[in-house]
Image (cartoon, coloured by chain):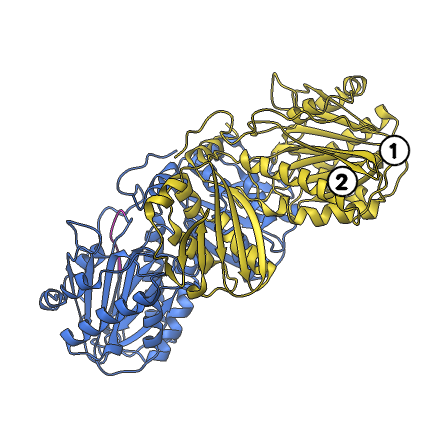
Chain colours: A blue, B yellow
Amino acid sequence: MGKITKVSPLAPDAFPDLPVIEGVAFSAAQAGVRYQGRTDVMMARLAPGTTMAGVFTRSATRSAPVLDCQAKIGLDSADGAAIIVNSGNSNAFTGKNGVVSTRAVTTAAAQTLGLPETRVFSSSTGVIGEPLPHERITAKLKELAETLDKGAIAAAARAIMTTDTFPKGAAAEISIDGKPVKIAGIAKGSGMIAPDMATMLVYIFTDAAAERAALQAMLSELTDVTFNCITVDSDTSTSDTLLLAATGASGVKVDGATTAFRDALHGVMLDLAHQVVRDGEGATKFVEVAVTGAASDADAKTHAMAIANSPLIKTAIAGEDPNWGRVVMAIGKSGAAADRDLLTIRFGDLLVAENGWVSPAYKEADAAAYMKGEYLRISVDLGLGHGKCTVWTCDLTHGYIEINADYRS
Amino acid sequence: MGKITKVSPLAPDAFPDLPVIEGVAFSAAQAGVRYQGRTDVMMARLAPGTTMAGVFTRSATRSAPVLDCQAKIGLDSADGAAIIVNSGNSNAFTGKNGVVSTRAVTTAAAQTLGLPETRVFSSSTGVIGEPLPHERITAKLKELAETLDKGAIAAAARAIMTTDTFPKGAAAEISIDGKPVKIAGIAKGSGMIAPDMATMLVYIFTDAAAERAALQAMLSELTDVTFNCITVDSDTSTSDTLLLAATGASGVKVDGATTAFRDALHGVMLDLAHQVVRDGEGATKFVEVAVTGAASDADAKTHAMAIANSPLIKTAIAGEDPNWGRVVMAIGKSGAAADRDLLTIRFGDLLVAENGWVSPAYKEADAAAYMKGEYLRISVDLGLGHGKCTVWTCDLTHGYIEINADYRS
C-alpha cells in the first residue's frame, strides 16, 4: 500500500498560476465558523453584465444554500453578482434555521455590495446538521468587500477547503477570432464524492460573453462527462454546487457551437474533477476506468461506476494486487448487460482476460509490476455494442477510514 | 474503533450444537485445493426422496457451478442427492475449463455415490479466475463417501470457510401436529456480501417433507427478507448459492401455509444471515438499519441499503461517532422518495432528528455513549407512507482493508 502522507501523494506539485479574469475579484477572511487560524470564507465579486450558470446536487436532502442558488440561477440580470462561500459548516439539514441563515448571509452581502439579493449566490460546506453561525460570516462582509482583489483567486481556493489536502485550480487561455479568452476555476472536495456531484464546490470564471441559456446548456452537458464521472466513495453530498460566471470582459461572444471555448471549458472542468479524485480521502492511486463495447453509453457508465465504486477492487488497488477477478465480479453485479465469455480486460496495456478467461499471454508478475504505479488504467471491452464511458476514481486505504472515523472529533 | 481480533469480536461464543437431521450425512476432507493443513472440501449425502430447492446469485458473470446447480435444481427426482463444496477456488471466470471442472466433480461424485449426475450439486468458493484443480477434489471422493456421518455437520461448516473467522450454524426444532421436525443449516461468507446473495454459501437441511414447488416458493420468499437484506460491502459474488434439502424423514408434510415450519425456517435463515454480517471482514459493530414510513416497501429498502452501504456512515460507526448528518446524506442520495422536513432519525431509542433538524432533546454525549455498543440500531421514519424494511450490516474498519488488500498474496 502506498504511503499516506499529510498532503495527498497524488497532489500536483503546486497550485497553478491562474490568469486574472477581468470582471471578477476575490477575497478571503477568517470568520471562525468552525476552524481557527485559517481562512474559512471567500467572496467573489462579478461585474455588471456577468452571466451565471449552475449545476447542483440532486440529493433529496439538499441544503438551504443549494435550494437558494437553484431558485436564483435561472434569472436573467444585467446587475453584477457575488458568490459567498464558507467552509466548516454545510448548513444542511438545519431545518428552518437553514433558510434563515442563508438569507441572513445573502441579504447582508447584497447590502454591502449594492446588489439585488437575487444576485448573491452562497454555498456552505462542512459538517451537516449543526446551525450555521451566520453572524460570524456577516461580521466579515465589510472586510471581504474592502479587500477584493483581481489576483486573489488562490486565496479563495484555500478558504473553501475542508478535508482537502491541497487547493485546487485550473485554467485555460485560448484565442477566438484573434482575441484572447481566459477561463480559471477553483474547486474543493475530497470525500463524499460520487456522481450527482458529491461534496464538491466548483467556481469557474471566464471573460467570455455568453447568453445565460447557452452557458447553462454547455455547463450541464460538460458536467455529465467530467464531475459526474468521478467517484471517491459513492456517497453524494447535500451541498454540491458548480457555478460558472461569464463576465464578458473579453468582448468575445461564445455559445455551444464555439468549439475552442467548449473544449477549453471541458479541459478546465476535467482538470478540476481529476484534482478532486487526486485528493480523494486517503488516496494513493489515481485510477481511470474505461468501458467500451457496451450495449449503450448508459450501460457503459453503469459498469464503469460498479468497478470504480467496488470496495473490493479499491482495496485490491491499494494493495497493488492485480485482482482482475474482482473486475469480473463488479461487471456481473452491476445490473447492466454483460456476457462473461465476451469480456476483455486490460490493466494499462496488459491484456489480462479475454474469451471468458485469463489471457494465455497474461503474466501475473507484469501485472503486479504495473499495479505499483501511481496512475492506473483499467479498461474493459464488453464485446456487445458501441456504448462507452470513462470514469475516474482512487483506491480505498486506511487513510480513508482514519479521516472518516474521526471527522467530527 | 473497536479492537480487530483474529476471530470476529461479534462471533457467537461457540458453534451451536446442531441436531441430527435424519436422511443426511456429512463428511469433510483435506484436498489441498489451495489451503494446506485444513479441510477444504465437504460432502453432504441426502437420502432418496429428498426434495431440493435453491436460490443463486443474480450476477451476470456467475460461476460454472452456479450455472450447473441452476440447471438441475428445478428437476423433480425420487433419487437421493449430494452436495459437494470446495473452498479456496471459486471456479468462476474460468472459461470453458470451468464447465469441464464442474462436470468432472459432479460426474465422479455421482459414480462414487451411485446417483444420477443431475442429482449432484456442487459449489466452489474462493479466488476468481484461476483454474480449479478438480483432480484434487475427485481424488478425495472415495474418502468422503466412506466417512459420511450423520453427526458431522460442524466439520462440513468448517471445510467451506474462506476468509470467515468462525464457522456458522443455526438450527430449530419444532413440533407439528405433535411430531418433532428439525432444521439445521450451515453457511460461509464474510466479504463480497450484498443483496442478491454475495459470496455466501448456505446449506439448510430439514427432516420435513415438502413438494419441490412449495419448498422453492418458501425459500425464495424468505431469502428476500433474510440473505437479501444483509450487506457488508455492497459487492456481489459470482458464486452465491443457497440450497435447502427436505429429507422427509420426520413424516411431517409442510408447505407455505405451515406457519410453524415457515417461522422456524425464517429464524434459521435470519440467524445464519446475521452470522455472516457478524463475520463481515474487519467488523467490530453489528448494525441494524430499520426504515419505516416510506412511500413503499421498495423505497424503504432503497433507503435502508443506501444507509447500510454508505462508506461514510460505516466509517463513522467504526469511529463510534454519532454522525447522523451522514444518515441524512444517504437518504438524500438514495434516489427514493424523501422529504427532508418529515424525517425522524433514532440511534437506538435516542431521538436524534425530527422535523428537518436535530431534536431539541438530543444530547451528543448520550449518542456518543450509545455508539460504543457492539450492537447498534439506526432507525429512520420518512413520514410519507407505510413502506418498511430492515437490513443488517457492519462497520467499515482498517481490518476490511487489511483483509482485502492482501487476499491473494
| Helix, strand or loop for disc 1 | loop
Q: Which residue is mark 1?
A: B116
Relative horizontal placement of residue B287, taking residue A171 as reference (left or right): right
The reply to whether residue B141 is in sight is yes
Is there a contact, CB below 8 Å, between mark 2 and mark 1?
Answer: no
Relative horizontal placement of residue A138, taking residue A3 as reference (left or right): left
Residue under mark 1: which chain is it in?
A: B
Quarter holding the N terminus of chain A is: top left
In the picture, residue A185 is in which quadrant? bottom left
Residue at the spot x=37%, y=68% of the render? A55
For the magenta stretch, what is the residue range? A165-170
Give percent across and percent down for residue A312: 50, 40
Q: CA distance from mark 2 to mark 1?
A: 14 Å
Task: Tell me the tag on residue B389.
Answer: none
Give percent across and percent down for residue A299: 57, 58
How many other residues sit within 10 Å of disc 1, few (<14), some (14-19) or many (≥20)? some
Give percent across and percent down for residue A243: 31, 68
